[in-house]
Image (cartoon, helix red, strand yellow):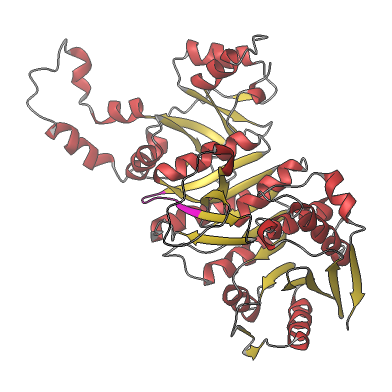
């Protein structure tokens, strides 16, 4: 069983507009131009896996009216997703995504979410420990809510590894850096270091070579490191090898919603079916992400769609 | 039609050593009338509902009275709640849980819900581990949706 952790889930509201402009009223007259769905990276992975027939348990915190909507929608999505959320005071956040189909842009507004009390976190950790016995694969991804320290993620990785699960993480760089330095290395790390001025292991990341070196260093602690590089390519590091994986066609930036989560789901799927084969997992994940970019909405690819994409990218060894 | 067709796959539950106060807060936050009670391995060992907790704080002689209208206020309830709020919920739960399995016929769940007057039943696997719950409304909903095979 797969266990996904989304500490700060959200109700995603996608709004499709032509020619979005600030300081202007936009009326939506067509309901097909707006969509509300359960979101947050781990939850997205659970939904994507359910489309591939893989059951999972989704964990995290929810609160208030938005929290109830999120759970209801998640349960409606698939009976393959078992919910296991700690209910807290406050409201689950909303993420608003404005997709401009004319300018090909995505404008995102993410709310902070509820503040988590110490007692809520303790309740979460107890539940996490209890369900870990059912999990052979744990996915920890997304942002952290107020009140949860970054060190908690390292603890989640430690507990999961101790129970024998294979751990995938897609978290903000500072959290991943801390857990690697603390000696709690997940098996698979997916990371985006493209933010301007970003450092990792106290090193600047302004060149391609710097990304390659960091990827290699992460992979020396984990089994697989995926670093986003440009929209159409990623750096893949494993066991002393570094590869560049590149889509053959340009990718429309406004079609990339959820692509990273489809990537993780693809890797998890391959792992469950074929075991821990890092390069093959990365290829399958990339194909899943590519398949998800074929549609403008946040969609989750079918197996057929993923398999089709396997011949639409190139793999080149760079080190 | 099976239980799996109508159940909610949700692991909301309380541990048997959870305090009464925490359980009341959880029920309130989730707007639920009851929850399964589980042990460390997530095995269902009972269930608790609002009725059990109200019974625990209402003075026992009330059941002998025809009316409680002459009772002036809720002080007695509050005093009794203070006495039990830090006690483990296993002291107040239904200790013989009525459960169903995913592959049980839906009519079995419907029968238990009516026969025992429960609002929900825990759904468990062969090891009694919690998989979810089935509520009265879940049974009604699938029937309403035209799945009349039950």
Q: Residue A191 in the image: state x and y as whole percent.
A: 68, 71
Q: Is residue A80 above or below residue A314?
A: above
Which range of residues does the magenta coloring cover?
Answer: A88-95
Q: Position of residue A97 (x, y in %)?
A: 54, 55
Residue B125 is a magenta residue: no
Relative to B41, is A222 on the left or the right? right
- Looking at the picture, tell me which residue is in the foreground, A66 or A135: A66
- The quadrant of the rendering that contains the C terminus of chain A is bottom right
**Residue extending furthest bottom?**
A203
Compared with A261, A213 (above or below) is: below
Q: Nearer the viewer, residue B82 or A101?
A: A101
Give whichever of A235, B104 is nearer the camera. A235
Q: How many marks?
A: 0
Q: Residue at x 90, y 68 (%)?
A: A314
Residue A243 at x, y = what percent?
A: 86, 75
Q: Residue at x 46, y 50 (%)?
A: A26
């Amino acid at each position: 069983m797969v266990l996904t952790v989304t500490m700060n889930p959200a109700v995603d509201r996608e709004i499709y507009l032509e020619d979005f402009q600030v300081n202007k009223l936009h009326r939506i007259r067509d309901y097909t131009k707006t969509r509300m769905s359960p979101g947050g990276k781990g939850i997205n992975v659970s939904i994507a896996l359910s489309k591939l027939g893989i059951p999972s348990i989704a964990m995290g915190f929810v609160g208030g009216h938005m929290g109830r909507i999120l759970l209801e929608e998640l349960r409606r999505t698939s009976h393959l997703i078992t919910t296991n959320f700690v209910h807290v005071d406050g409201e689950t956040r909303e993420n608003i995504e404005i997709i401009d189909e004319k300018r090909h842009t995505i404008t995102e507004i993410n709310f902070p979410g509820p503040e988590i009390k110490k007692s809520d976190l303790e309740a979460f950790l107890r539940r996490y420990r209890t369900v870990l016995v059912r999990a052979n694969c744990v996915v920890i991804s997304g942002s952290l809510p107020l009140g949860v320290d970054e060190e908690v993620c390292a603890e989640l990785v430690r507990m999961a590894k101790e129970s024998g699960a294979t751990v995938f993480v897609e978290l903000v760089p500072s959290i991943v850096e801390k857990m690697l330095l603390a000696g709690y290395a997940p098996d698979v790390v997916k990371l985006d270091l493209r933010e301007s001025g970003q450092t990792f292991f106290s090193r600047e990341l302004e060149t391609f070579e710097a990304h390659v070196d960091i990827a290699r260093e992460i992979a020396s602690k984990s089994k697989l490191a995926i670093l986003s590089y440009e929209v159409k390519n990623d750096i893949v590091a494993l066991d002393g090898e570094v590869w560049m994986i590149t889509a053959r066609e340009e990718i429309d930036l406004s079609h990339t919603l959820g692509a990273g989560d489809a990537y993780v789901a693809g890797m998890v799927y391959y792992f469950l079916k074929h075991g821990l084969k890092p390069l093959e997992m990365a290829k399958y994940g990339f194909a899943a992400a590519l398949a998800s970019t074929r549609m403008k909405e946040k969609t989750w690819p079918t197996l057929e769609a993923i398999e089709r994409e396997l011949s639409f990218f190139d793999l080149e060894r760079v080190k | 039609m099976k239980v799996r067709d109508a159940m909610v796959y949700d692991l909301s539950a309380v541990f048997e050593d959870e305090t009464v106060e925490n359980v009341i807060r959880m029920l309130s936050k989730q707007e639920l009338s009851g929850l399964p009670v589980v042990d460390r391995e997530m095995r269902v060992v009972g269930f608790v509902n609002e009725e059990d907790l109200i019974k625990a704080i209402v003075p026992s002689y009330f059941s002998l009275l025809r009316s409680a209208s002459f009772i002036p206020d809720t002080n007695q309830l509050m005093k009794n709640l203070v006495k039990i709020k830090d006690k483990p919920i296993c002291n107040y739960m239904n200790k013989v849980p009525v459960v169903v399995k995913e592959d049980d016929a839906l009519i079995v769940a419907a029968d238990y819900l009516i026969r025992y007057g429960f609002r929900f039943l825990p759904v468990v696997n062969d090891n009694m581990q919690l998989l979810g719950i089935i509520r009265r409304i879940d049974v009604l909903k699938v029937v309403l949706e035209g799945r009349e095979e039950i």
